[in-house]
Amino acid sequence: MLEEKVLQTICKYHLIEKNDHIVLGVSGGPDSTCLFHLFLHLQKQLKFTFVVCHINHGIRKEAFEEEEYVKNLCKNKQIPCYVKKEKVLERAKKEKIGTEEMGRYVRYAFFTEIAKKEHANKIATAHTKNDLVETTIMNILRGSGLSRAKGDRTHSRKKIHSSTY
């Protein structure tokens, strides 16, 4: 049922098209691990390829276990995996920005770097409704108008995920 719903959404919004090469952000948490498995099941049907990127922010003690989990998951399924370790807390303090914001910046900079290296044309991440709320609040705090503050899921998804690198 989940796979069907995801497939319908992908087709409705043309999120994945034939011959796409996608960078998939995988944290090791349940959302991104689920998306990883969905990509495995859908890649032959939709005729796309993907690589995985994982950032170890070095914040929580579980971060190193999650890194190993993602590397092993990819190795077992023969999916290329790129891992980067980053001292997000130190960088956030140095640049005087929030830890979450720095973490997001580091992630997307790494995803973009790997997309260029891999000649990937899309980046995919597993966002939940909580992520959308967080984006909306951050946009409001940054002074966005109401039309830009809401963080529209389909618009931002197409904008972020359909960029050519």
Image (tube, helix red, strand yellow):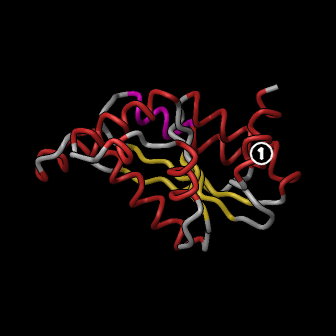
Number of numbered discs: 1
Q: Quadrant of residue 137?
A: top left
Q: Quadrant of the N terminus?
A: top right
The residue depicted at 66 percent of the width and 47 percent of the height is 74
Where residue 140 appears, as percent x and y from the top left, is 27, 39
Q: Quadrant of residue 61?
A: top left
Is residue 67 in the magenta section? yes
Is residue 78 in the magenta section? no
- In the rendered structure, the answer to whether residue 80 lies left or right of residue 5 reads left
Q: Which residue is mark 1?
A: 40
Q: Which residues are magenta?
A: 62-69
- In the rendered structure, the answer to whether residue 84 lies left or right of residue 99 reads right
Between residues 43 and 3, which one lies in front from this camera angle? Answer: 3
Between residues 6 and 152, which one lies in front from this camera angle? Answer: 152
Q: Residue furthest right?
A: 45
The residue depicted at 77 percent of the width and 60 percent of the height is 48
Compared with 138, 22 (above or below) is below
Q: At label 1, which amino acid type do we have?
A: Leu
The residue depicted at 54 percent of the width and 51 percent of the height is 155
Where residue 69 appears, as percent x and y from the top left, is 57, 36
Mark 1 secondary-structure assignment: helix
- Within 10 Å of disc 1 (Cα), the crowding (few <14, some 14-19, many 20+) is some
- In the rendered structure, the answer to whether residue 150 lies left or right of residue 52 reads left
- In the rendered structure, the answer to whether residue 125 lies left or right of residue 39 reads left
